[in-house]
Amino acid sequence: MGDPVLWLGGWASGLACWRRALESLYPRREHTFLDSHAVLEEPGLLALAAAGLPRQGTLAAWSMGSLILHKALAAGDFTPACRLISLSPIFDFCTEGGPWPKAALIRMARRLPREREAVLSGFWNLSKGSSQVTPAQEEAWSRQSAGYGMPALLQGLEFLGGTVVKRAELPASERHLFLASPQDPLSPTPRGVFPGREWHGYPRGHLPFLDHPELLGPLLDGAGPAPVLL
């Protein structure tokens, strides 16, 4: 059995909906899942879940989950022993010049109570992009997204719009790696991070764990992936 992985999902996107795909792409591992909305509701869940991983285990935090992880690390009260991987990492979702100005996030929050399906569908289409998601995987995402209450979705948007973590605030660690893309439609890589020993690139998209197991798999083993031309 390989080293265990704890997946921390994103906004309206608990990654347990893709358990079967992740178990197939990253076999011979124990896969567990933590919902980012549950962590926003009860922040202590993150440290509790990470404490259950051995040193050679990995906390893989994706999208909004990565911002939750970054905030906890920067606060200095979260020092997990396991490996850390930030997937499609976010430090400032509404950064100037980025794809999500704060006004757009505010409009999204205002629309959500009366146009929930349209807002979630638009978000999913951006997240999916050109990824080769199967119909079954798409249906699984839709089913799980329908389970979130409105307060949780709005709290998530407020967190995304109101949280900024400076990269320099993170503790320096060779055991915290980043898998990112400048062509990510939701969280493009910050400027100046490539080349970097802890930063690894993939070509495009927001679902690297589905699109690029050949890159993520070695990181879960504590090794570096093959170089990628960006």
Image (cartoon, rainbow, N blue to C red):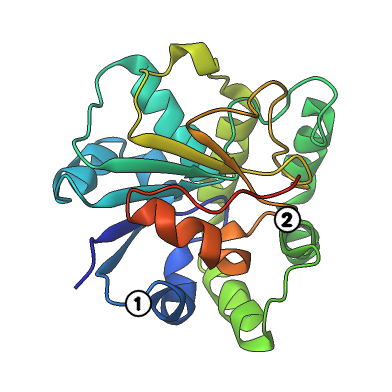
Identify residue type, mark 1: Pro
Q: Position of residue 190 (x, y in %)?
A: 69, 27
Q: Identify the residue under disc 2.
A: 205
Q: Quadrant of the N terminus?
A: bottom left
Q: Are marks 1 and 2 in contact (CB under 8 Å)?
A: no
Image position of 161 with respect to 30: above or below: above
Image position of 108 with respect to 150: above or below: above
Other-residue count near label 2 (Cα within 10 Å), few / some / many at <14 / 14–19 / ≥20: many
Q: Residue furthest front?
A: 226
Query: What residue is shown at x 52% (from left), y 71% (from top)?
Result: 144
Identify residue type, mark 2: Gly
| Image quarter of residue 196 | top right
Query: What residue is shown at x 79% (from left), y 62% (from top)?
Result: 129
Q: Earlier in the sequence, mark 1 or mark 2?
A: 1
Q: Identify the residue under disc 1.
A: 27
Query: What residue is shown at x 33% (from left), y 48% (from top)?
Result: 222
